[in-house]
Image (tube, grey):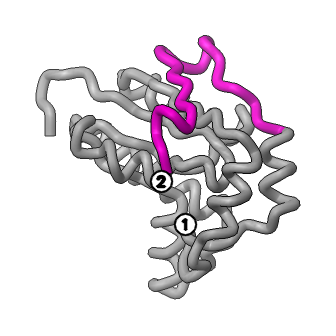
Amino acid sequence: MRHGAVTTLYVLIGVPGSGKSSWAQRNAERLAAIIVGSDQVRNDFRQSGRNPLDGDAVFAEVERRTREQLAAGQNVILDATHYLRRYRTYAVNLGQALGARRVALWFDVPLADCLRRNADRSDLAFGDEIVPERIVREMFQQLQLPQPDEFDEIRRLTPEDHPA
C-alpha cells in the first residue's frame, strides 16, 4: 500500500494473444501493482459455482476488486481486452472518480502473432483458453485505440517491447 501517493490504474487494451496477461505478470512487481483480471474472476466464479460466462456479473466483480484496491492506495493493472471504448468506460470512470492516474497500455501486435499465440494456449482455464480464430480476427478489426480524453497517458507496446 502506498499512502499519500497518487495511485495508477493501468488499463490493458488488446486482443486475445497480444500478450496482456504475460506483460502484467512480468511487470506487476516493478509497478508495485496488483493484477485484477477478468480471466481470474471467471476462474474464481467457476470454482465457486457461479456462471463464469455472465459478463455483467464478471465485470461487476472486476470493478469491485479494482475499486477496493485503488481505494486502499494500491496501483492496479486491469487485465482484460478492453478492445472497445464502451468496454473500458467503467475503468476510465472508476480511475477518475478515485483520483488515480489512468494509463492505457495498448498492445499493438500483428494479427498473425496473436493468432499464433492464441493457438498455442493450453485451453485448461480462462486466460489459457483458445479463443476461436474468427473471434480474434473480429476483435482485431474492431479494436478502438485508446484516446487522450480517456487516459492521462497512452503507451503503445509492440512485440519488440514485450516479447512473448
The quarter of the image holding the N terminus is top left
Residue 113 versus residue 39 in the image, above or below: above
In percent of the image, x 84 and y 51: which residue is there?
Answer: 137
Measured as percent of width and height from the top left, residue 36 is found at 41, 52
- Indicate whether 162 appears above or below 99: below
Observer able to see residue 90: no
Foreground of the two, 12 or 118: 118
- Look at mark 1 in the image and give the residue it sits on: 127
Task: Identify the residue shown where x is 64% and y is 33%.
Answer: 108
> How packed is label 2: few (under 14 Cα within 10 Å), some, or many (20 or more)?
many
On the question of residue 2 being in view, the answer is yes
Q: Which residues are magenta?
A: 142-164
> Picture coordinates of residue 152 (x, y %)?
48, 15
| Residue named by callout 2 | 21
CB contact under 8 Å: marks 2 and 1: yes
Q: Nearer the viewer, residue 30 or 164?
A: 164
User: Of callouts 2 and 1, which one flags the residue occurring earlier in the amino acid sequence?
Assistant: 2
- Residues packed near mark 1 inside 10 Å, few (<14), some (14 to 19) or many (20 plus): many
Magenta-colored stretch includes residue 74: no
Task: Indicate the amino acid at tag 2.
Answer: Ser
Q: Between residues 97 and 38, which one lies in front from this camera angle?
A: 38
Q: Whole-percent x and y of residue 53? A: 68, 72
Measured in 3D between alpha carbons, the distance from the residue under mark 2 to the one under mark 1, in whole angstroms, is 8 Å
The residue type indicated by label 1 comes to: Gly
The image quarter containing residue 119 is: bottom right
Instruction: Identify the secondary structure beneath mark 1.
Output: loop
Q: Residue at x 44, y 53 (%)?
A: 22
Name the residue: 73% across, 57% down: 115
Q: State whether residue 150 is above or below residue 122.
A: above
